[in-house]
Image: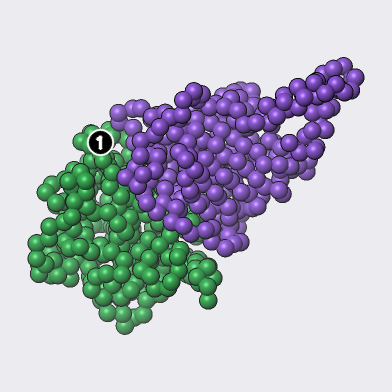
């Protein structure tokens, strides 16, 4: 079977799965077996990281660590469910939590924040245990919207240029100025927020402000607000691994700052390659076939190809998620 | 010059000389030269005139450095052809060489129909990927990023990313219907030449209903003409719609603000939010 046909069949399969599962998480959807071993995330990475020797990264001509290249994302269940969980259904296999701090792997919501999170979870309308029967919101990813931190948790290519770090994704991109300029006014809010980077030792530290609070962390309603600030830390742990850590601060919904942590691997590297599971074409350029196009990213046109998705969700009575408004 | 064009210029000569056929060899030569001049691409359509060629800076790979944030300053997004002002629409000169787009007669009728119904038919109103070259002259900045294997263009509009591969791979075999087509680049001197095929027939060239079929073939040329200017040219071929290839050209300006950066225009998010609670919305009717 030629690669083009293979790619077309793969695309059709993905589209079919998305349609079949709607309303649910769109894009890169996979069917998971109940006996899938628990997918490693923060806890396994913390244990692995503790055993790694210090690493002295290569440097660019500017003298900063060279993070360039294609990097996988978090992998796992495709950002279905952020906290530790056992098998729920074909969309959501057992997986460790993304949360490395607090140590219990739970997002430290305030009581009000947790009540709101549980309300969203109970209104997903996915047939999960504990649902209220009311349909509330569907993941913004079901509408093919692009937002933080979902972009940063996905596969991407890092390109470094004087004064900026550029991250190229399968559908979309991000430019992080590293020239010391101030961020845009917090009055201006964006789905991606506004990113500013600087180097602390061998770590690229990115402060994200001006988030509009419309995105979710996963497909099942873990949320942030327009008050949330996000600090990412990108550091080479070894030649083929970035230690990606991201901390969220928002006293209006979280009782204290909390952190996600997972490794990003160069394609085709890393222990068990996460079972060869790939969440994005960006990470798919391990030369499994002698396909000259294997490293290329081809048009996805998620929104353009997903006209039925929003229409059916609206017909089912889902509301449009406009972010949460914490009490003052 | 084709035979048909030669005939038309003879007719032009006839009309200018008051009906008497131009038989004298000298006059014929003059009219012939005038015709050639009229057809030769001239640096007249919005092009920065450079008497001495500009020598651009080079990237580490040795190619002209086109990187940075660029944006057009013209009204091509509303209408590629010359147009008057109307409510919310600034007037503008044509960016089409020769002025008019050479539609086949049946296609011209469709263009006029598109124009009449542009408020509902323009794919921009549905927030779809706008295609090439339209995305270049929409009123949003974009950033060019060069690497050894590709040139990437990051557009503020839709946060769209476009990969122009320079890795030696030819266009993949079709048929493929992509909104933005398949882009393959090469260098000709200081010019980045991008060959784009594999389009669908869903996008327009502007808000005035100028359109194409899925046989569209676009050849873009990005040429640095100064430290802060690129000349953008796009040749458009589509034998289903046009009687001959035609060309647009315009300068691209480097954004000068010290704080310039790509922000975002996430059209689908704004549109869906607006229409979601509108009981009379037709956005969701297609299905």
- Count the marks: 1
**Residue A261 shows up from this direction:** no
Relative image position of residue A100 (x, y in whole percent):
16, 62
Write down the quadrant of residue B79 in the picture: top right
Quarter in which the C terminus of chain B is drawn: bottom right
Relative image position of residue A29 (x, y in whole percent):
41, 68
In the orientation shown, which residue stands out farthest toward the top?
Answer: B18
| Structural crowding at the residue carrying mark 1, measured as other residues with C-alpha within 10 Å and reported as few (<14), some (14–19) or many (≥20) | some
Relative image position of residue B26 (x, y in whole percent):
80, 21
Residue identifier under label 1: A183
Q: Is residue B44 above or below residue A306?
A: above
Instruction: Name which residue lies at 75% across and 22% down.
Output: B30
User: Residue B238 vs residue A23: left or right?
Assistant: right
Q: Identify the element where label 1 is drawn.
A: loop
Instruction: Name which residue lies at 40% across and 56% down.
Output: A170
In the orientation shown, which residue stands out farthest toward the front?
Answer: B25
User: Residue B189 vs residue B216: left or right?
Assistant: left
Q: Is residue B215 above or below residue A327?
A: below
Give the letter of the purple chain.
B
Quarter in which the N terminus of chain B is drawn: top right
Instruction: Name which residue lies at 27% across and 79% down.
Output: A37
Q: Is residue B15 above or below residue B287?
A: above
Give the letter of the green chain.
A
Chain identifier of the residue bearing label 1 in the image: A
User: Residue B153 vs residue A76: left or right?
Assistant: right
Relative image position of residue A145 (x, y in whole percent):
42, 52
User: Residue B251 vs residue B85: left or right?
Assistant: left
Q: Is residue B243 above or below residue B33?
A: below
Instruction: Name which residue lies at 80% across and 20% down.
Output: B27
């Amino acid at each position: 079977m030629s690669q083009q046909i293979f790619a077309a069949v793969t695309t059709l399969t993905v589209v079919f799965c998305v349609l079949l599962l709607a309303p649910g998480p769109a894009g890169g959807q996979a069917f998971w077996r109940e006996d899938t071993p628990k997918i490693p995330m923060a806890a396994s990475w913390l244990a692995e990281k503790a055993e790694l020797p210090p690493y002295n990264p290569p440097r660019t001509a500017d003298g900063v660590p060279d993070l360039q290249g294609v990097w996988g994302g978090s992998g796992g269940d495709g950002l279905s469910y952020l906290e530790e969980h056992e098998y729920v259904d074909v969309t959501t296999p057992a997986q460790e939590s993304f949360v490395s701090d607090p140590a219990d792997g739970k997002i430290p919501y305030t009581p009000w924040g947790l009540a709101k999170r549980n309300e969203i979870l109970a209104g997903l309308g996915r047939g999960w245990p504990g649902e209220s029967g009311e349909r509330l919101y569907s993941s913004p990813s079901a509408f093919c919207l692009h937002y933080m931190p979902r972009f940063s948790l996905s596969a991407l290519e890092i390109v470094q240029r004087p004064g900026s770090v550029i991250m190229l994704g399968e559908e979309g991109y991000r430019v992080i100025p590293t020239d010391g300029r101030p961020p845009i006014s917090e009055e201006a809010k964006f789905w991606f927020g506004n990113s500013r980077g600087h180097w602390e030792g061998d770590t690229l530290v990115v402060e994200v402000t001006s988030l509009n609070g419309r995105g979710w962390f996963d497909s099942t309603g873990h949320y942030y607000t327009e008050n949330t600030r996000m600090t990412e830390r990108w550091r080479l742990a070894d030649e083929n691994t970035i230690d990606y850590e991201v901390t969220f601060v928002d006293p209006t919904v979280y009782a204290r700052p909390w952190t996600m942590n997972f490794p990003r691997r160069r394609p085709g590297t890393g222990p068990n390659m996460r079972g060869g599971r790939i969440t994005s074409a960006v990470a798919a350029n391990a030369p499994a076939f002698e396909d000259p196009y294997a490293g290329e990213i081809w048009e996805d046109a998620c929104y353009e190809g997903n006209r039925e998705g929003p229409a059916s969700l609206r017909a089912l009575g889902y509301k449009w998620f406009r972010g949460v408004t914490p009490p003052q | 010059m084709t035979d048909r064009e030669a005939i038309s210029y003879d007719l032009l000569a006839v009309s200018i000389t008051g009906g008497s056929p131009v038989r004298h060899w000298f006059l014929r030569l003059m009219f012939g030269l005038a015709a050639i001049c009229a057809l030769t691409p001239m640096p007249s359509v919005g092009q920065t005139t450079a008497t001495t060629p500009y020598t651009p800076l080079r990237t580490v790979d040795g190619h002209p450095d086109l990187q940075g944030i660029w944006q057009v300053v013209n009204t091509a997004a509303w209408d590629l052809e010359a147009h008057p002002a109307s409510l919310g629409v600034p007037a503008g000169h044509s960016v089409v060489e020769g002025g008019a787009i050479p539609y086949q007669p049946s296609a011209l009728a469709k263009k006029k129909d598109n124009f009449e119904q542009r408020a509902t038919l323009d794919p921009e109103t549905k927030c779809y990927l706008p295609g090439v070259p339209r995305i270049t002259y929409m009123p949003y900045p974009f950033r060019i990023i060069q690497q050894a294997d590709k040139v990437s263009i990051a557009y503020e509009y839709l946060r769209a990313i476009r990969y122009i591969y320079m890795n030696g791979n030819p266009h993949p075999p079709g048929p493929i219907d992509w909104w933005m087509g398949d882009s393959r680049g090469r260098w000709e001197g200081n010019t980045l030449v991008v060959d784009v095929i594999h389009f669908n027939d869903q996008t327009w060239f502007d808000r005035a209903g100028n359109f194409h079929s899925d046989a569209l073939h676009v050849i873009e040329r990005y040429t640095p003409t100064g430290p802060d200017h690129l000349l953008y040219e796009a040749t458009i071929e589509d034998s289903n719609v046009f009687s001959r290839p035609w060309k647009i050209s315009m300068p691209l300006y480097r954004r000068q603000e010290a704080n310039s950066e790509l922000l975002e225009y996430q059209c689908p998010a704004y549109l869906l939010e607006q229409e979601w609670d509108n009981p009379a919305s037709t956005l969701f009717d297609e299905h």
